[in-house]
Image: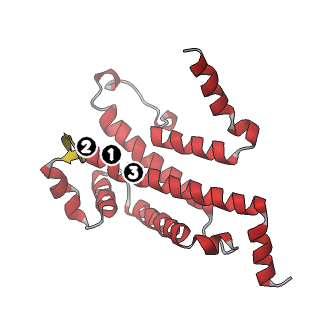
Amino acid sequence: MSELSKKWEEFLNPETLKTKLILASIYLAAFEILKGSVIGRIETFFTDGFGPQGNILSPEYAVEVESKHKSKVRASLEWLKEQGAITSEDIEVFDKIREARNEVAHEMPSLLSGDNPVDFIQQLEQMVVLLRKIEVWWIMNFELAINSDFREAEIDEDRIMPGPLLALQLILEIALEDSEKASYYYDEFRKRTKKF
């Protein structure tokens, strides 16, 4: 069988095509969750109020974050690094994740036709690690630090389940598990909402 025939066979196989589309979609969604965590938490921290366009950022945001780079994501990553939330190595990991995201988003036809340069599983694992690191840092250094109920408490960081990470976990389980496991959350939600 020629290489072209193999590509057509793979493309026309419904299970293979569905799997690739699902993995690509999850990858893109996971990247947006990670990017939202990188940018959004900092913007919320520097918010002075709300207006018709959303958050009204304090003047300090421009000085402390935006001045670091013309890219909002890069500026936010640099701010997180200065705060000790992430390292230069984490930024390199993010850059590789972003490059793979761009390949997935802009080269979808070649991805679907058999060329798969992105190792989705490895990349998703790296996204989860980085997302968890950033979110737990925010929780430990801001949310719990300003809450008097937790000042003296010993917190096991490994047991913290940040909301964005939970959302990503739900996406993975619902999209990638067999239909019985995947429908568990939906079925439970329906049962519990019928009680009200």
Residue at image x 44%, y 62%?
94
- Name which quarter of the figure residue 70 lies in: bottom left
Give the left or right position of residue 40, taking residue 182 as reference: left
Q: Position of residue 174 (x, y in %)?
A: 64, 42
Give the quarter of the image for residue 181. Answer: top right
Image location (x, y in percent) of residue 152: 33, 24
Q: Are marks 2 and 1 in contact (CB under 8 Å)?
A: yes
Compared with 62, 54 (above or below) is above
Q: CA distance from mark 2 to mark 1?
A: 6 Å
Q: Which is more N-terminal, label 2 or label 3?
A: 3
Residue 145 placement, left or right of 87: left
Q: Which residue is mark 2?
A: 45
Q: Position of residue 141 (x, y in %)?
A: 32, 39
Q: Which residue is mark 1?
A: 41
> Real-space Cα distance between discs 1 and 3?
8 Å
Q: Residue at x 43, y 30 (%)?
A: 155
Q: Which residue is mark 3?
A: 36
Q: Quadrant of the image for the N terminus? A: bottom right
